[in-house]
Image: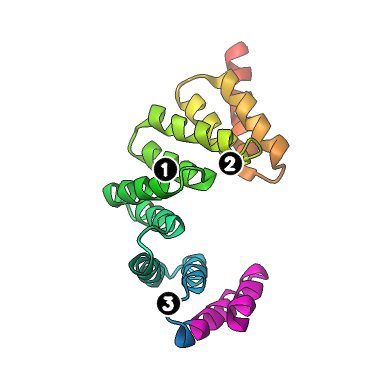
Amino acid sequence: MAHNNLGAAFAFSGKLDQAIFHYKEVLKVHPYHLIAILNLGKALVDTGKDDEAAYYYQKALRIDPNNADAHNALAVMLTARGKLDEAVWHCTEALRINSESPDTHLNFGNLLMKQGRINEAGLHFAEAIKINPDYAKGYHAIGVVLARQGKLKQALIFFSKALQLDPNHTQARKDLEFIKQTLSAYEQ
């Protein structure tokens, strides 16, 4: 599948319009090529074409209803659109299919945070770092939960760990500085 490989190369280099073109070329010849469909969906999301991406993720699920990646991707899109009940269903399905995905646990946790279900979210974030102890996003997410619970010193530890694992994690850096300033103000 030369076009799929070209699409992946263009996507990796940030040339998403060219990636989309090549993924669609694959689908002209092989309309049920699941990898090309999923890659196309991601490229479409990354270019802000969410409606078209949703179509392809749904197509992936028609081909393989047990595709955890498609369920997870749809859940993220639905969460962003505020369709939280549908997103919960897709996250639940993704985890039923593959409970070992730190990304799905992170996304489900973020969704639960939007619903105000902070403790449940924390459990999913903890599961994400249990699966992948080097998962900076998971440590950051637990830090956010702890900060919202008022456990600022504990949050500081998790934000620091996230930055240790990923020094370029900008949000973790911002949150760490905010917590440090907050703690400093309390100590004065």
What residue did someone put label 1 on?
A: 108
In the structure shown, which secondary structural element does the residue marked by tag 1 occupy?
helix
What residue did someone put label 2 on?
A: 137
Q: 150 or 131: which is nearer to us?
A: 131
Mark 2 or mark 3: whose residue is earlier in sequence: 3
At which x and y percent is residue 85?
27, 47
Mark 2 or mark 1: whose residue is earlier in sequence: 1
At which x and y percent is residue 18?
59, 81
| Type of amino acid at the residue the image marks with label 2 | Lys
At which x and y percent is residue 132?
61, 39
As measured in the structure, the alpha-carbon distance from the residue carrying label 2 to the one carrying label 3 is 33 Å
As measured in the structure, the alpha-carbon distance from the residue carrying label 2 to the one carrying label 1 is 13 Å
Taking 184 as reference, is 106 left or right?
left
Q: 86 or 178: which is nearer to us?
A: 86
* Residue at screen point 45% across, 30% down: 123
As measured in the structure, the alpha-carbon distance from the residue carrying label 3 to the one carrying label 1 is 28 Å
Image position of 87 with respect to 129: above or below: below
What residue did someone put label 3 on?
A: 32
At which x and y percent is residue 151?
52, 19
